[in-house]
Image (tube, rainbow, N blue to C red):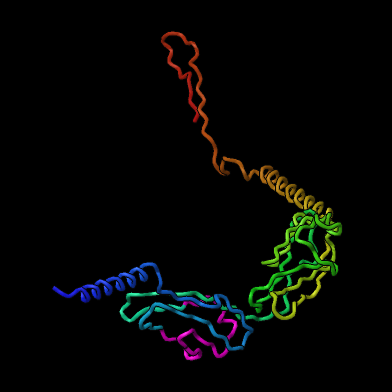
């Protein structure tokens, strides 16, 4: 049996081991980042931080040649817009007993380019008209503002007197402007602006859209053409009937007829053919 001091040392070791096991169970092994979201202009270097604690001998996966791996994170020599995304820093011990990870969002800032618009030169009053605006370079993605005759169009047309007679839906994220229905007051020059909080906002060319009435002359002409075609069809059917093209009896054939005459009264002893058949 050991001495009292040996027993106390054993109890102390067991206590320390219990603390370590409890710390591991409670998640004291951690991986974290001081900047969970990083924004950096294109073509600049950037570091994504990744710090850890609770690992005795951590290991990390290798990365591409254009970045440098450090115990506290990775450093890009120069970022491009394609590098935008979410990165995961994973740390684990060689034995695989402990594991932790943290995610860092990288946004490479790129100013918007000049947006392009798709605007009909004319649209019919009372119908649905769709106008679109887009640009492909901005990072983060751009939001869009529409202008009519140089005046900013509000998201809710009923909020200002200038657009109270319009019925449209404006989506700043997709850049789509939908009139449903289109009114006469919607005639004007339209343009849109793209901005993403970085660089200078860009504005598209202005394009004029005319809200026009329905073409009554075209409708009347279409009705007249339909009536003429219907008349030709009826005349063709009548002409075919009048020429016998629809007779069920074929030409060159005749139907057979049978005529039967009852025998007339005759005196006894006389023999005379009194009935006849005609075929």
x, y percent for residue 230: 73, 48
Q: Is residue 201 left or right of residue 109?
A: right
Range drawn in magenta: 61-88
Q: Quadrant of residue 108?
A: bottom right
Q: Position of residue 57 (x, y in %)?
A: 36, 83
Does 138 sit left or right of 54 as displayed? right
Image x and y of residue 131, in percent: 74, 65
Q: Is residue 55 above or below residue 242?
A: below
Q: For this rendering, which residue is in front, 108 or 37?
A: 37
Quarter of the image for the N terminus: give it.
bottom left
Residue at 45%, 86% in the rendered image: 71
Q: Is residue 219 magenta?
A: no
Depth check, front residue: 118 or 192? 192
Please tell me whether residue 174 is drawn above or below residue 165 in the rendered image. Answer: below
Viewer-side residue, 21 vs 219:
21
Residue 79 falls within the magenta-colored stretch? yes
| Numbered disc total | 0
Horizontal side of residue 91 vs 134, given as left or right: left
Query: Looking at the image, which residue is at 70% across and 43% down?
Result: 238
Would you identify the image quadrant in which residue 153 lies? bottom right
Looking at the picture, tell me which residue is in the foreground, 238 or 122.
Answer: 122
Residue plotted at (76% across, 48% down): 227
Q: Picture coordinates of residue 11 (x, y %)?
A: 25, 71
Question: Picture quarter containing residue 198?
Answer: bottom right
Residue at the far left: name it: 1
**Which residue sits furthest top?**
268
């Amino acid at each position: 049996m050991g001495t009292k001091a040996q027993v106390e040392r054993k109890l102390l070791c067991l206590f320390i081991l219990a603390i370590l096991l409890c710390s591991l169970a409670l998640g004291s092994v951690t991986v974290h980042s001081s900047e969970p979201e990083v924004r950096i202009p294109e073509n600049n270097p950037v570091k994504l931080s990744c710090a850890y604690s609770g690992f005795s001998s951590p290991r990390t996966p290798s990365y591409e040649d254009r970045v440098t791996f450090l115990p506290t994170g990775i450093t890009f020599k120069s970022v491009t817009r394609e590098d935008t995304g979410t990165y995961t820093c994973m740390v684990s011990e060689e034995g695989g007993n402990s594991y932790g990870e943290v995610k860092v969002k990288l946004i490479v800032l790129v100013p918007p380019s000049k947006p392009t618009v798709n605007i009909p030169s004319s649209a019919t009053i009372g119908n649905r008209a769709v106008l679109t605006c887009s640009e492909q370079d901005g990072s983060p993605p751009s939001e869009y503002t529409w202008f009519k005759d140089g005046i900013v169009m509000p998201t809710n047309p009923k909020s200002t007197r200038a657009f109270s007679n319009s019925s449209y839906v404006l989506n700043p994220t997709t850049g789509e402007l939908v009139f449903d229905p289109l009114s006469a007051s919607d005639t004007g020059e339209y343009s849109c602006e793209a901005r993403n909080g970085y660089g200078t906002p860009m504005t598209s060319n202005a394009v004029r859209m005319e809200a026009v009435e329905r073409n009554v002359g075209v409708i009347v002409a279409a009705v007249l053409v339909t009536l003429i075609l219907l008349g030709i069809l009826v005349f063709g059917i009548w002409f075919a009937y009048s020429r016998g093209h629809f007779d069920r009896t074929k030409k060159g054939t005749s139907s057979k007829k049978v005529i039967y005459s009852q025998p007339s009264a005759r005196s006894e002893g006389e023999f005379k053919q009194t009935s006849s058949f005609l075929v």
